[in-house]
Image (cartoon, rainbow, N blue to C red):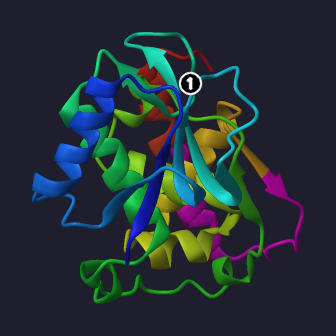
């Protein structure tokens, strides 16, 4: 799979560094390609730009706005001054959201809980979580990337990430609590002892995370 990256507004040294990383980075595995025109999967651009021609932003295109390090926006962005490690980590999170890796496809599926599998609500990020929140767990950036492109149900997030039910549900509840995602209304999940126990575990999990983030109940 090749992912196409378009750049508008990058300085020539920055563009050259991006091209060099695509050719030499073992972590990117030759997956990325720099393009000057046509459709792209990821687009780097100035925050105020709305016309990306000759590049084309699809509905699924991830937009990385150019911003200085430490700026106050919660959205995913292209850091200036250029930081190769931060850039590679950002691309890897996006890359894994586009396609299952072999490790993900072979990951053991979580044990289903019948009542919870009836939940067909879907979730999508409306803004990118803060680095403080994502820093609570190394897997949070990946889960956020999955929810950034298109709406996902809890079961889809579990299947894509290979993470346990309680872990994914807890992350969704944390994002909901802080106003980072939107939810589509769906069927009501019937009550059962298993659902109640799972809900209690997630409540404790969320309370601990909120305490670490410094939020008050």
Q: Position of residue 30 (x, y in %)?
A: 22, 66
Which residue is located at x 39 percent, y 86 percent? 109
Which residue, given by chain and number where applicable, does mark 1 sit on? Answer: 74
The reply to whether residue 201 is in sight is: no
Asked where in the image residue 53 lies, by quadrant, the reply is top right
Horizontally, is 54 left or right of 92 in the view?
right
The reply to whether residue 48 is in sight is: yes
Horizontally, is 166 left or right of 163 in the view?
right
Position of the C terminus by quadrant: top right
Q: Position of residue 38 (x, y in %)?
A: 61, 60
Task: Tell me the magenta residue range.
Answer: 183-204
Position of the N terminus by quadrant: bottom left
Number of numbered discs overlaid on the protein picture? 1
When the figure is inspected, residue 211 is found, relative to residue 159, above or below; the finding is above
Q: Nearer the viewer, residue 1 or 38?
A: 38
Q: Is residue 184 magenta?
A: yes
Which residue is located at x 33 percent, y 61 percent? 32
Asked where in the image residue 155 lies, by quadrant, the reply is bottom right
For the residue labelled by badge 1, is the local secondary structure a helix, a strand or a loop? loop
When the figure is inspected, residue 136 is found, relative to residue 125, above or below; the finding is above
Q: Nearer the viewer, residue 87 or 188?
A: 87
Query: Badge 1, how many Cα within 10 Å: few under 14, some, many 20+?
Result: few
Asked where in the image residue 199 lies, by quadrant, the reply is bottom right
Which residue is located at x 47 percent, y 79 percent? 159
Which residue is located at x 72 percent, y 40 percent? 126
Q: Is residue 193 magenta?
A: yes
């Amino acid at each position: 799979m090749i992912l196409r990256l378009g750049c508008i507004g990058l300085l020539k040294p920055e563009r050259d560094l991006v091209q060099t990383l695509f050719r030499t980075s073992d972590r990117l595995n030759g997956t990325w390609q720099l393009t000057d025109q046509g459709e792209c999967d990821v687009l780097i651009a100035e925050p105020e730009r709305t016309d990306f021609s000759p590049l084309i932003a699809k509905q699924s295109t991830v937009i990385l706005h150019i911003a200085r390090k430490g700026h106050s926006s919660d959205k995913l962005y292209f850091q200036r001054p250029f930081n190769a490690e931060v850039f590679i980590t950002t691309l890897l999170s996006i890359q894994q959201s586009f396609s299952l890796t072999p490790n993900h496809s072979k990951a053991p599926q979580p044990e289903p809980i019948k009542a919870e599998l009836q939940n067909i609500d879907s979730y999508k990020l409306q803004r990118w979580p803060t680095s403080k929140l994502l820093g609570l767990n190394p897997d949070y950036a990946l889960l956020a990337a999955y929810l950034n492109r298109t709406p996902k149900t809890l079961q889809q997030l579990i299947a894509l990430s290979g993470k346990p039910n309680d872990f994914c549900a807890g992350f969704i509840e944390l994002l909901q609590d802080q106003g980072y995602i939107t939810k589509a209304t769906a069927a009501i999940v019937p009550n059962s002892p298993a659902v109640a126990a799972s809900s209690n575990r997630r409540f404790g999990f969320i309370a601990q995370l909120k305490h670490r983030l410094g939020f008050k109940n």
